[in-house]
Image (cartoon, grey):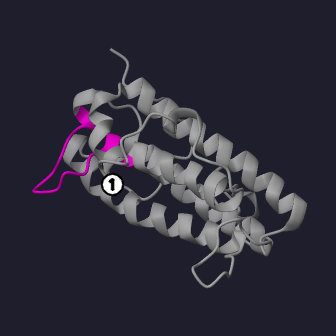
């Protein structure tokens, strides 16, 4: 294959895009890598723990889904947590999303994460088109300053970077799946089929 014939996989950020394209591309690549690491598993596999850690792939899915909605609905838009988060246990347990994932079916967890990412992509695309990454978020720091949308995207990139590393280790323990990127033709499938 000639060098000019190489086509990037669908999750690869642009080689020379705008700032927004690069930041959103980096976030989407991490989302894709994370989704690949948790894809095609059943309840036992999603609840696997390694060593002394209580983190599971199912807990990571629920945690990152909550972060997606919190970042763009609450912090950016100033809306309360809604949808699947109306009945939650955060008042009594700061790690509720991690701890309660065992009570969700694999289908619920995949739908929760996929739905949150779809909502976030829609909100982020509209926000960038309507004011760019420099626009202020609704949330303010104690001194009254508002972070920019750019800062929120960078914070979510950091969150995914941390937890995709956790997912790497747990998935390898589940079934030996390793690697930075999914195969070029990979598409998410969700819960393991019986």
Q: Who is closer to the viewer here, 44 or 105?
A: 105
Instruction: Report whether 109 appears left or right of 100.
Output: right
Question: Can you give x and y, in whole percent of width and height, for residue 56 in the image?
Answer: 27, 46
In the picture as drawn, the residue positioned furthest to the right comes out as: 130
In the picture as drawn, the residue positioned furthest to the top comes out as: 194
Dot 1: element: loop
Indicate whether residue 74 is drawn in magenta: no
Question: Can you give x and y, in whole percent of width and height, for residue 95 in the image?
Answer: 31, 52
Q: Which residue is mark 1?
A: 94
Q: Is residue 1 above or below residue 21?
A: above
Residue interval drawn in magenta = 45-60
In the picture as drawn, the residue positioned furthest to the bottom comes out as: 143
- What main secondary structure does the magenta stretch of the protein show? loop
Residue placed at 76% from the left, 64% from the top? 4
Instruction: Report whether 26 appears left or right of 84.
Output: right
Quadrant including the N terminus: bottom right
Instruction: Report whether 113 appears left or right of 150.
Output: left
Residue placed at 74% from the left, 46% from the top? 122
To which quarter of the image does residue 38 belong? top left
Q: Who is closer to the viewer here, 136 or 163?
A: 136
Residue placed at 75% from the left, 65% from the top? 21
Looking at the rendered structure, the number of numbered marks drawn on it comes to 1
Count neighbours of disc 1 (C-alpha within 10 A) and say few if under 14, some if 14 to 19, many if 20 or more: few
Q: Is residue 20 above or below residue 97?
A: below
Q: Who is closer to the viewer here, 49 or 96?
A: 96
User: From this viewpoint, is residue 150 visible?
Assistant: yes
Indicate whether residue 59 is drawn in magenta: yes
Question: Can you give x and y, in whole percent of width and height, for residue 115 in the image?
Answer: 59, 36
Question: Can you give x and y, in whole percent of width and height, for residue 121 in the image?
Answer: 69, 49
């Amino acid at each position: 294959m000639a060098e000019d014939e190489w086509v990037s996989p669908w999750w690869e950020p642009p080689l020379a895009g705008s700032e927004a394209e690069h930041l959103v591309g980096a976030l989407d690549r991490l989302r894709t890598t994370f989704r690949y690491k948790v894809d095609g598993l059943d309840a036992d596999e999603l609840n696997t723990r390694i060593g002394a850690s209580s983190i599971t792939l199912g807990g990571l899915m629920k945690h990152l889904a909550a972060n997606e909605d919190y970042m763009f609905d609450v912090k950016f838009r100033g809306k309360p947590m809604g949808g699947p988060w109306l009945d939650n246990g955060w008042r009594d347990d700061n790690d509720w999303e991690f701890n309660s994932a065992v009570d969700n079916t694999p289908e619920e967890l995949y739908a929760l994460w996929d739905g949150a990412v779809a909502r976030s992509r829609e909100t982020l695309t509209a926000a960038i088109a309507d004011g760019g990454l420099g626009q202020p978020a609704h949330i303010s720091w104690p001194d009254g300053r508002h972070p920019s949308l750019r800062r929120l995207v960078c914070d979510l990139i950091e969150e995914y970077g941390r937890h995709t590393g956790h997912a790497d280790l747990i998935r390898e323990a589940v079934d030996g799946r390793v690697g930075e990127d999914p195969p070029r033709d990979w598409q998410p499938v969700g819960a393991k089929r019986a």
